[in-house]
Image (cartoon, rainbow, N blue to C red):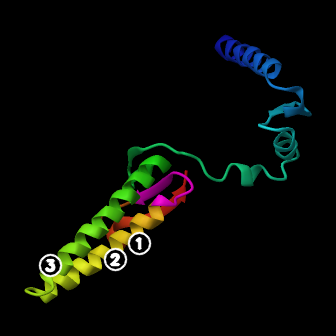
Amino acid sequence: MTELDKLISQSNVSLKQTILEVPKANVVQDGNSVVIGDSPKTAEEIASDSQATLITIYHEGKTYLHTYWWGTRLGVSRTLARKIGQKGGHSAEAAGALAGVLGLKLPQAAVYCSFISGVSYLIGTALTKTPGGIVFNFTAGMPSGGVWGFEWQ
C-alpha cells in the first residue's frame, strides 16, 4: 500500500506542476477531476463529456505483434500504414507497367498483373488516408485468410 500511496503522491505533484505551466483558461475542475485541454473550449467539452469520444477517436497508435491463445493481433501505427500505402501505390505502377509489357505475349499473365495493380492501388490509396493506427486480428484456419477483426487504435 505504501508503494501505491507513493505513486499517487508523485502523480499529484506532477499534476500540480502541469497545472502551473498551463494557462488557467485551459484548466477546468469538475468535481474531483481536473481537465487540461489544448484550449479553453476543448477543456470545457472534455469536462462536460459532450465531445470526449469525438476528440479521442483516432490516435497515432503503435506497431506491434502480440500472440494469444486464439491467434495473433497486429497493430500498425498511422505513420507505418501511410508508408505502406505509398509503397502500395508504387507497386500498382510497377504491376501496371508489367501488365503492359506482358500484354502482347502473355495476355493471361497481363490480366493477373492488372488485377494486382488495381488491388495494390486501392489498398495503397486507402492506407495513405488512414486517420489513425489500425489493429487486425488473425486466427489460422479461419475463412478469409484468418482475418476476423479490424479496429482503430
Task: Work out how far the residue at label 1 is from the one at label 2, CA to CA, in angstroms.
Answer: 6 Å
**According to the image, label 1 marks what residue?**
122
Residue furthest out toward the left: 105
Q: Position of residue 152 (x, y in %)?
A: 55, 56
SS for callout 3: helix
**According to the image, label 2 marks what residue?**
118
Chain part drawn in magenta: 128-137
Task: Work out how far the residue at label 2 is from the one at label 3, CA to CA, in angstroms.
Answer: 16 Å
Say left or right for 64 vs 131.
Answer: left
Q: Amino acid at mark 2?
A: Gly
Asked whether the residues under the numbered discs 1 and 2 touch, taking CB atoms below 8 Å apart as contact, a structural biologist would say yes
Q: Position of residue 46 (x, y in %)?
A: 82, 44
Q: Residue at x 73, y 53 (%)?
A: 53
Whichever of callouts 2 and 3 sits on the residue coming sooner in the sequence is: 3
**Against 149, is 21 above or below?**
above
**Disc 2 or disc 3, which is closer to the eye?**
3
Name the image quarter holding residue 10.
top right
**According to the image, label 3 marks what residue?**
101
